[in-house]
Amino acid sequence: MKYYNKLIFEISKKGREGFNLAKKDLPEVKLPKELARSNKANLPEVSEFDVVRHYTNVSQKNFGVETGFYPLGSCTMKYNPKINDELATLSGFANIHPLQPVETVQGLLKIYHETQRILAEISGLAAYSLNPFAGAHGELAGLMIIQAYHDKRNDSKRNKIIIPDSAHGTNPASATVCGFETVEIKSNPDGTVNLEALKAVLNDETAGLMLTNPNTAGVFEKDIAEISRLVHEAGGLLYYDGANLNAILGKARPGDMGFDITHINLHKTFSTPHGGGGPGSGPVGVCEKLLEFLPNPIVKEKDGFYYFEDSADSIGALGLFYGNASVYIRAYVYLMTFGKESMSDIGLMAVLNANYIKDSLKDIFELPIKGHCMHEFVFDGLKDQSTGVKTLDVAKRLLDYGYHAPTVYFPLIFSQSMMIEPTEVESKETLDEFINIMRVVAQEAKDNPELVKTAPHNTIVRRLDEAKAARQPIVKFTDIK
Amino acid sequence: MHKYLPHTSQDIEEMLKVTGANSLDDLFTSIPKKLRLTKPYNIPSALSDYNLTKHMHDLAKQNQELIIFRGAGAYDHYSPSIVKALISRQEFLTSYTPYQPEVAQGTLQYIFEYQSMVCELTGMEVSNASMYDGATATAEAMFMAFAQTGMNKVLVSSTVNPRIIDVVKTYARYRDIEVIVTPDRDGVTDLEFIQKHMENAMGLIVQNPNYYGIIEDYAGFSDVVHAHDGLFIMNAEGQPLSLIKTPGEYDADIAVGDLQSFGLPLSFGGAYVGYLATKMKYVRKMPGRICGITTDVDGKRAFVLTLQAREQHIRRAKANSNICSNQSLMALAVTIYLSTMGKEGTVMVANESMKGAHYLYQELLKTNKFEVVYNKPFFKEFVLKAKFDVEKFEKDLLKDGILGPLHIQDNNLLFAVTEKRSIEEIDLLVRKVVEQK
């Protein structure tokens, strides 16, 4: 990677143009002075080729899934097939206005409807809405559904959502945004739900429990049936955070475990590109008794004709239109490349890959949870703590060797968490190389701890002064002195 | 094995040996037997690449590509080829949130450039890295005002896109926030009503240009809102901001809106991108990611996520917002579009759209088939009241491959014109109007 560090504003030159527009032979329209902005926005003035070279150089400062192994736990960084991109951007999808009459968008509505149905079958629920824009947005939708359900039953005391301390940060944040109070319960040492802790907080104020299964430590909740019974007996609903669905594809379904509501991250399990942090897509699914609460509008089908419908008891609209359509079209293509024949192999190979790395490295990294893991697992730092080399240092040193780092310092239940999720797309050879480099880094930690503690050394920039950025925020070009 | 799965049977055997499991099923013993799926999913069979390609082309053909005179939040602007080409680079497309800044300087840099451009367009001091869309950005702005003031009543002008108002109401309902939709007067927000109802309100939400395409004059609004310690929130779609008075110039506290018109395809409503920008004094109440500049240990300039103590992964239940994944790639598309069109091109697109819209407006009036609804300055959208059957009109237009105006209420039609619409296309639409009885 080369250290290209110019901003687009810094290559701007007055008088340069990158556009080619037709001018209509019509009279100019002049805005009344009091309604017009006083100065033009100071956008760059660059040629088209300037833009192309600039953003090509900028892109090369990034590490993508195609660059190398990206074992970022809980993020499911799998291959994003090219055919998905090609087919999702056909002009018959890209040039369609969201407010066209339904008879002119039957193809899109069919994709929407089919994707809903496939997701419902995979998760064992009654129906889905594809409207939520991302995982956290799906969580918010799900929590609104929980609230709407209790409201409709005039069960207005239920204002508490129970969340294990091993949960993703979005879970408690979504609960707050939805107006709930979060009750955090301490997990068992393996991150699973502590039944006694759960029983102690269940009562007539319980609105629901949010759970990731397998959990963020890669462990399946073996007591899920009991958890489901307890929560439902207390009058609450059970919410499934689908971030880790990849692990159980073909093996188990959230609906069968007793979950009432789920969201699925299409950008994780169903391979839509992560895009540097979005667009995601977080379809929300529900069991039969919650159908009426799904977000509006809902795509329905009758006699082969697809149409939108609003439900009077719906939680309402969650966005201007119907979610990230270009994302769920990609997911649909992905689902159709696997189909019923191969879908379950995804979970099998994802789990095999994770266990293979874990068992190949557990002699030098601290493995806090013994036994088979699901699609990911957590190391609690290096076994040999005498060198002072921490998880962060190992992560940074991996960057030097051309790997993306695992998720670090999450889940919060271990102090040196290093969460590794290889996904199913990686070959044994890739895993072997990674295992080898992890061993090399562990050896370096012994032989030359300073080298690891000051890593990375080979990246285009090295460790950053994050405190300085927060102390004197420079958040736009004109802030630069 | 499937082509996306590289495992040979030999690989599987060798790997299982390392894990100590006898079979793949052995790895799943933690799933209780009675919860294990025993049969394949009831989903369609896999398609070969070629058959899938055919299938998707067939589905694409079942959607009609039309000559578009409809907007209402999604606009048919031209996007230069380089936008799609550059955002398809795998380094942008397949990376995730820049958790490891040393190998994510590309993402961080374009976020910084994006924030800079949003600030230029809106006249605000700080922007975040992007929101899902303009509607959810508006709802999040309401939460900022809620957090800042502690008041649980918000005023929303009825001239705001009703779809945005719906989303604001959805978000408000679960926080027990009362949404008061304030009436309009001749298509513009009624300041007098607001003066009377600002007491104990967290703020006011307006839109410019408004839902009817009217460029409103918001002079004096911020004084009224600030006199009651509220926050003035302005929703403005990106493209008009190259011409109209900015939220910053109106002393808005938070500016929000959609940026789809800057190079993103219509794509049936998504993926688009919303922006949220504010004054520096409210930055700690802001949702989402913010990128800043710092140096590395060698003193090199570098980009980094900053002020993260607001966010869900640190603050959990106490976070300002639950947003995590946003619309980063779409923000990149906007940044590339704005770089390409630049300082002059952006203004020209806005002018060409406005010229076309005003030409259509005049031509439609000449047909004597419409009544004027609002006599106000407008940008690229406007409302006219038809004196004919609007349902039949829509069907007639579709026969000629035209997506006509949006029927909004009574016989009122909301027209939109972008720079893509030629004089010939506009004249065709006018001829279709003449044929109406």
Image (tube, rainbow, N blue to C red):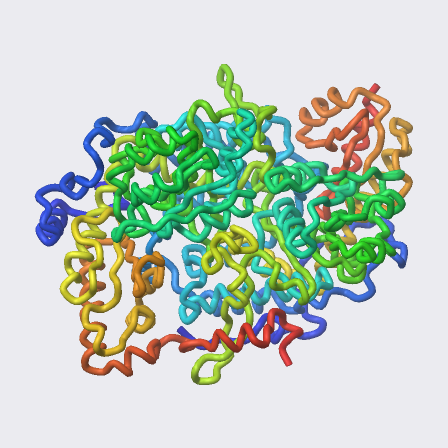
Say which residue appears at 33% left-offset and 64% top-offset: A405
B383 or A349: which is nearer to us?
A349
Quarter residue B72 falls in: top right
Say which residue appears at 78% left-offset and 44% top-offset: B210
Left or right placement of residue A365 versus residue B20 in this view: right
B362 or B247: which is nearer to us?
B247
Q: Where does residue A151 sit, x and y in percent of width and height?
A: 56, 29
Left or right placement of residue A387 versus residue B146 in this view: left
Say which residue appears at 74% left-offset and 21% top-offset: B391
Left or right placement of residue B62 versus residue B7 in this view: right
Q: Where does residue A233 sit, x and y in percent of width and height?
A: 37, 28
Q: Answer yes or no: is residue A284 visible.
A: yes
Give the number of callouts.
0
B228 or A427: which is nearer to us?
B228
| Quadrant in which the N terminus of chain B appears | top left
State whether residue A335 is above or below residue A3: above
Which residue is most to the bottom? B298
Q: Where does residue B99 sit, x and y in percent of width and height?
A: 42, 63
Say which residue appears at 16% left-offset and 67% top-offset: A364
| Quadrant in which the C terminus of chain B appears | top right
Quarter residue A342 falls in: top left
Q: Answer yes or no: is residue A346 visible.
A: no
State whether residue B342 is above or below residue B26: below
Left or right placement of residue B383 versus residue A46 in this view: right
State whether residue A478 is above or below residue A229: below
